[in-house]
Amino acid sequence: MADQNTGPILVPVLGDQLTRTLASLRGRTKDDSVILMMEVWDEATYVKHHKQKIVLIFSAMRHFAQELRDAGWTVDYTRLTDKDNAGSFTGEVARAAERHNPRAIHIVEAGEWRVQQAIEEWPDKFDCKVEILPDDRFVCSIAEFGDWAADRKTLRMENFYQEMRKKTGLLMDDGKPAGGQWNYDKDNRAPPKDGMSAPARPKPEPDEITREAMDLVEAEFPDHFGDLGRFQWPVTRDEAETAADAFFAERLPDFGTYQDAMVHGQDDLFHSMLSTSINLGLLDPMELCRRAEDAYRNGDAPLNAVEGFIRQLIGWREYVRGFYWHHMPDLESANALNAQRGLPEFYWTGETDMRCLADCIRSTRENAHAHHIQRLMVLGNFALLAGIKPREVQDWFLVVYADAYEWVELPNVAAMILYADGGKLASKPYAASANYINKMSDYCKDCAYSASKKTGDGACPFNSLYWHFMDRHRDRLESNHRIGRIYANWDRMGEDKQQDYLDTADAFLRTLTPAKSGWAGD
Ligand code: FAD
Ligand code: DLZ
């Protein structure tokens, strides 16, 4: 077959592979390769992505295509509204194969299961050799994670992270962790100071390419969730590097201490806001880790900040990616806690008197972003305690964030926040009452509910929902040594108090209106 075809090598580059050093581009010559980039309806509509996410991806793809052309590459680019657009990656590759008669197709494996399944059919579909290359933008390959996981009864991020530290040499001194400890998580939990705010970050103005993508999205996807008014994501490597420079210079030193803090109306705090750029391929996570380490070695940032940042990238990010591929496709339908409640409508509208949830949803709608602890301990904690169906929560998280791809969203949602995997990723559910949110944020002070009131009218729903959750999952959780001792407190309360908690939670749960708006595309 390959002998009949005399054309170039066709190199499809997917929307989250926008890296000049991509494995499929390395070693290719410009006069012998055609790079194929495809805006396709399947990807734009498999869920009803936040408007900012589609603008970000199309604008970044169009800028990257231009950058490649300027560097002398031949780029064949399909726009979404081209009249012959086949609608899918496979359909577009088929059309390109007719145009170019390639002697081979070289593609880097897809980030998502759904897309990878389609790519794996290409060798049978196309009349030329198809090479699928590992995505070496990750420190740990899928195969390496599989080997690491194979002989373990439980998978834990901490063990994996230590392996990645040894493998990369990051923050290692003579084979030992810098500072003597692997993990400074206990120094990453300071509550916010009164009136705390972080330095403003650079917000690139939308250029003509981005404005064109905005017009396209408003025309084609007017009913998708989210506002475009505050679009402020880097769409090129240069813009992403400017964002990274500002983070290292101004916010990294406080990143560690206030990693878990939340402040009403302060959407970024000391977080890097780099996930969209990293996931698209505009920034290399290892380069960022090396810069962070330099900041520590040069005395520009403390160890709790630098270790915390590096842990997120070579620890959590790599771990959830390996975990995703290790547990797919089952992870998508996991529901170990048999959660059956529909997603409340307020996740889309933000209309709730719970001030913490309302603020996180506002930021989500305006910025296509909420920071980690908002996702985990407010939006995720509520979904866990209220027993929302994993599929509906997964769809919501996949729709609403500009950095959301299933490989990173699904393990965080199904396994980290919902415990739907039955504890394969986390040793216990991340369940918390109002006490946690009150300690780590200023949300509770102007809230319609009282964080200190446990039951009855005006009590923060997180308090009664917490015990409702613990009570209904007692059989599973009581034997868990990390959480089981909580039941001694529950038993000490006595039946009347317990009933009070359960009645308060039930009354609140009855007020929830399930989402009917079809935002997720159902
Ligand atoms: P920082 O706080 O500055 O962290 C630095 C980097 O570490 C991030 O840019 C990110 O690349 C990485 N990182 C941190 N935590 C995680 C994590 N738990 N998993 C993977 N990478 C991590 N991140 C995504 O990129 N896409 C998602 O779809 C996504 N969904 C999430 C859903 C839930 C329920 C939770 C709890 C977390 C999710 N995260 C996701 C992880 C994290 O919330 C975001 O990466 C982070 O908020 C991005 O903002 P930042 O760049 O300012 O991060
Ligand atoms: C998320 C997304 C969207 C909305 N549109 C496209 C697209 O039209 N073309 C493209 O190449 N990529 C898109 N993406 C990102 C893909 O979904 C992403 O590359 C896959 O998740 C890879 O598995």
Image: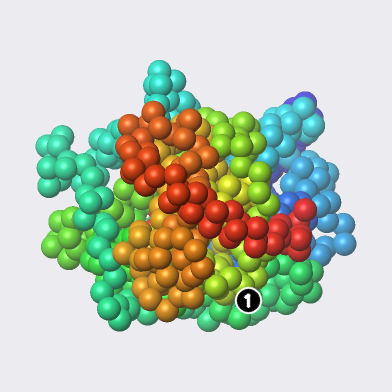
Question: Does the rendering let one see residue 514?
Answer: yes
| Vertical order, 440 against 32 (above or below) | below
Mark 1 is surrounded, within 10 Å at the Cα level, by few (under 14), some (14 to 19) or many (20 or more) other residues, namely some
| Vertical order, 205 against 478 (above or below) | below
| Vertical order, 412 against 226 (above or below) | above
Residue at 37% of width from left, 40% of height from top?
491
Dividing the image into four equal quarters, which quarter contains ligand 1?
bottom left
**Front in this rendered view, residue 515 or 484:** 484
Give SS at disc 1.
Answer: loop
Which residue was labeled with disc 1? 228
Question: Does the rendering let one see residue 100?
Answer: no
Question: What quarter of the picture does the N terminus occupy?
Answer: top right
**Looking at the picture, how far across and down is residue 175, in whole percent?**
15, 34
**Looking at the picture, how far across and down is residue 75, in whole percent?**
67, 57
Residue at 27% of width from left, 36% of height from top?
162
Colour basis: rainbow
Residue at 25% of width from left, 63% of height from top?
190
Residue at 56% of width from left, 34% of height from top?
336
**Looking at the picture, how far across and down is residue 160, in whole percent?**
34, 34
Where residue 11 sits, quadrant-wise, is top right
Q: Is residue 497 left or right of residue 39?
A: left
